[in-house]
């Protein structure tokens, strides 16, 4: 209990002390992580936390906070401790079968929306697919932006699909989203105006060197891209190309340094590039697009 939170400590002191412990442990996001955990364990939003700054913690609150702090110090990311993460402004629930959605993946959503704006369509509903949907992040972000669209999410994990389905329902998007258990796009029938995917793309040999937050807590099936990291693209790009409508777009997330190889795989599958890859906030090309030529 010495490192913990004796009852009587105020909310503000608990938050600062937690920040210091995280920082001393080498956690980059120490301040943010401490703020989110204190807020979540005490049921306070940012304004509530400021208002409650001088209030002493109850013993039960101090215990809950300490339990969460120990999980974070043991390498578990905040999103796993809370079982939730915000993506594209949407609160998503997570499960052991789903990747924690990353801010980088919002680049895929941005590029998809840019490309959809220029796809000619005569007042008909859009059809979209998200291959390997996990928590449903990409699909649900797109559906939230496009009221005239319907979408299907696939995943090889039935557990992930049930998390995605629950997220769709909670966000009021359930009647426009369907979910299919299959390997990549093998269970789908076209034609789609847009297909998006954040497939596994880490080289198998590099998994062991990932940060503990990723290596020990994200599902390896969602990370491992085979010996050269490109195995998933080799399967899913030709499948997706065959499912696109005329003028339809395929947008995939890629790892650092993979964009030109993934563009080549798209070219080999008959897609054209009318748009360069889109960089994430760190300036790394993160989303690659291909378009099916009008027939
Ligand atoms: N962006 C994840 C990471 O590097 C990997 C996700 C993936 O392989 N699609 O931690």
Image (tube, rainbow, N blue to C red):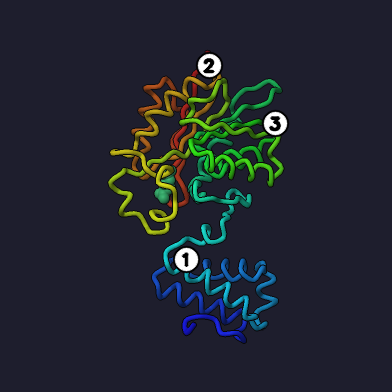
* Residue at point 47%, 77% (across, down): 20
User: Which label was assigned to residue 29?
Assistant: 1
The residue at which mark 2 appears reads as: 294
Residue position for label 3: 148
Where does residue 10 sit, x and y in percent of width and height? 62, 83
Q: How far apart in space, not on screen, are marks 1 and 2 (Cα)?
A: 47 Å
Q: Earlier in the sequence, mark 1 or mark 3?
A: 1
Report if the CB atoms under discs 1 and 2 are less than 8 Å apart: no
Give left or right: position of 53 versus 82.
right
Identity of the residue drawn at 62% across and 32% down: 151
- The relative height of residue 126 versus residue 54 in the rendered view (above or below) is above
Single out the mark in the foreground, 1 or 2: 1
Snapshot quadrant of residue 268? top left
Query: Tag 2, which secondary structure?
Result: loop
Q: Residues within 10 Å of mark 1 (few under 14, many from 20)?
A: few
Q: Is residue 26 above or below residue 282?
A: below
- Which x, y percent locates residue 31? 51, 70
Q: Earlier in the sequence, mark 3 or mark 2?
A: 3
Labels 3, 2: front one? 3
- Across and down, in percent, residue 162 comes to 59, 42
Q: For mark 2, does the 10 Å Cα neighbourhood hold few (<14), some (14 to 19), or many (20 or more) residues?
A: few
Mark 1 or 2 closer to N-term? 1
Which residue shows up at 47% across the image and 23% down it? 241
């Amino acid at each position: 209990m010495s490192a913990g939170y004796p009852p009587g400590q105020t909310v503000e002191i608990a938050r600062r002390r937690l920040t210091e412990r995280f920082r001393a442990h080498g956690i980059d996001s120490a301040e943010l992580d401490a703020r989110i955990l204190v807020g979540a364990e005490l049921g306070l939003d940012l304004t509530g936390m400021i208002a409650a700054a001088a209030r002493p913690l109850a013993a039960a609150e101090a215990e809950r906070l300490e339990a969460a702090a120990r999980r974070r110090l043991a390498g578990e990311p905040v999103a796993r401790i809370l079982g939730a993460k915000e993506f594209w402004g949407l609160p998503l629930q997570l499960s052991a079968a789903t990747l924690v959605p990353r801010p980088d993946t919002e680049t895929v959503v941005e590029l998809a929306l840019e490309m959809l704006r220029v796809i000619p369509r005569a007042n008909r509903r859009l059809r979209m697919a998200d291959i390997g949907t996990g928590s449903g992040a990409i699909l649900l972000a797109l559906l939230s932006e496009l009221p005239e669209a319907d979408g299907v999410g696939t995943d090889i994990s039935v557990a992930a699909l049930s998390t995605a389905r629950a997220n769709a329902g909670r966000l009021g998007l359930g009647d426009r989203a369907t979910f299919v258990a299959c390997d990549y796009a093998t269970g789908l029938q076209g034609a789609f105006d847009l297909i998006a995917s954040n497939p596994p793309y880490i080289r198998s040999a590099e998994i062991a060197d990932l940060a503990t937050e990723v290596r020990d807590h994200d599902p390896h099936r969602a990370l491992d891209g085979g010996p050269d990291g490109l195995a998933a693209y080799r399967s899913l790009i030709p499948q997706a190309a065959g499912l696109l409508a005329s003028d339809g777009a395929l947008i995939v997330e890629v790892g650092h340094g993979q964009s030109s190889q993934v563009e080549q795989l798209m070219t080999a599958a008959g897609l054209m590039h009318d748009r360069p890859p889109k960089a994430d906030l760190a300036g790394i090309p993160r989303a690659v697009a291909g378009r099916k030529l009008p027939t």
